Image (tube, helix red, strand yellow):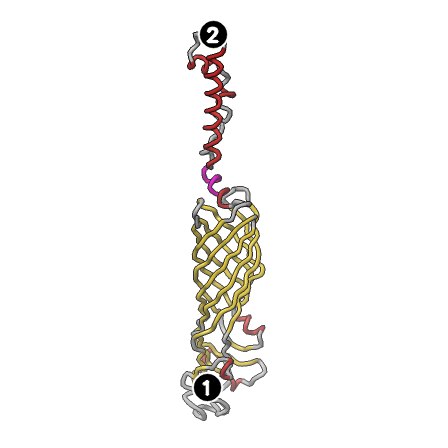
Amino acid sequence: MKNCVVAPLIAFSFATLATAVDAQTDPASPSQSPSESLAATDGTAAFPQEKHNPKQSPAAADSSRNEGDAEDQRFIGLRGRIAYIPSWMFDLFGADGGKGVVSPSVGPEYVTRKHGFETDIWLVFISYGMGDVPFKAKSDPDTSYEIVRSHIKTLTIGADFLWSKPLGDPRFTLTYGAGAGIGVVFGDLIRNQAYPPDGQPGDPTTYVKCPGPGRAHGDYCDASNDHYNDYQEPNWLHGGAKPILFPWITLPQVGVRWNASRDFVLRLDTGLSFPGPWFFGLSGQVGLR
């Protein structure tokens, strides 16, 4: 924008100077005043950029500055994501039981953009919380059902790598790419052996927690393990099934970026993810000068 203002001023200065010199040296009109000479001069020559309006389409001008291809753009912002894990995903991984889980995440991000490519570096808190749900391996008998509750969370660091393509309106841009991160796992994974109240195999969602070994009908609530009284599953380092690290992967990831102004950007994202299989997200960013 600065060049759009300076160029007309320079042109105006040189045109005025040339007119004044011409008025002083023209023998045919010695009495002609500078103002008359200026009026007689071709307006297009005197003001070569008079038709240029630097205020034209301010939204487009702002967004073009935001998209600057040859200029590094830096932003800092906040992102939120929601991944949905449907119950059939547990079936794919060889488990009976389970239910759909909504996994939200939130955290800051740092964005650099140049030549239509941007890198988003982020640090997010992700919750994988889940209420009491019956689970067992497909190969195990009905007596192996456990009621599982998750308070698992991760602190995940990662990056998105996105290309962009301008849409019809310069304020809007299509983004596409992929992302990946790795998270440190914390929180409890609670397990309790379960049994049907009437002692007959049936709908596992009606099963209840075993009060202790040998205190149920038939072979339920046996002594094969000590998963009673809200047993806390240990992590991998202590021989348990709870991971210590957990990935986050998006491929592909697509979105629409709205360049609201020079210093503020919103982006909507969606795509396939693990865990998932899909996610939705919103990011808000402010420019760094």
**Disc sitting over residue 180 in the figure:** none
Query: Where's residue 151, x and y in %?
Result: 43, 74
Front of the two marks 1 and 2: 2
Name which residue type carries label 2. Ser
Q: How many marks?
A: 2
SS class, disc 1: loop
Relative to 247, does residue 266 appear above or below in the rendering?
above
In the image, the segment drawn in magenta is: 58-63
The residue type indicated by label 1 comes to His
Query: Cα distance, mark 1 to mark 2?
Result: 109 Å
Q: Residue at x 46, y 20 (%)?
A: 17
Point 43% across, 51% down: residue: 286
Report if residue 64 is visible in the image: yes
SS class of the residue under badge 2?
Answer: loop
**Residue 176: x and y, percent?**
57, 54
The tag earlier along the polypeptide, 1 or 2, is: 2
Query: Residue 60 colored magenta?
Result: yes
Residue at the spot of label 2: 29
> Residue 66: image x %, image y %?
49, 45
The image position of residue 237, as x and y in percent, is: 50, 81
Q: Which residue is mark 1?
A: 227
Query: How many residues crowd around disc 1 within 10 Å: few (fewer than 14), some, or many (20 or more)?
Result: many
Q: Nearer the viewer, residue 240 or 276?
A: 240
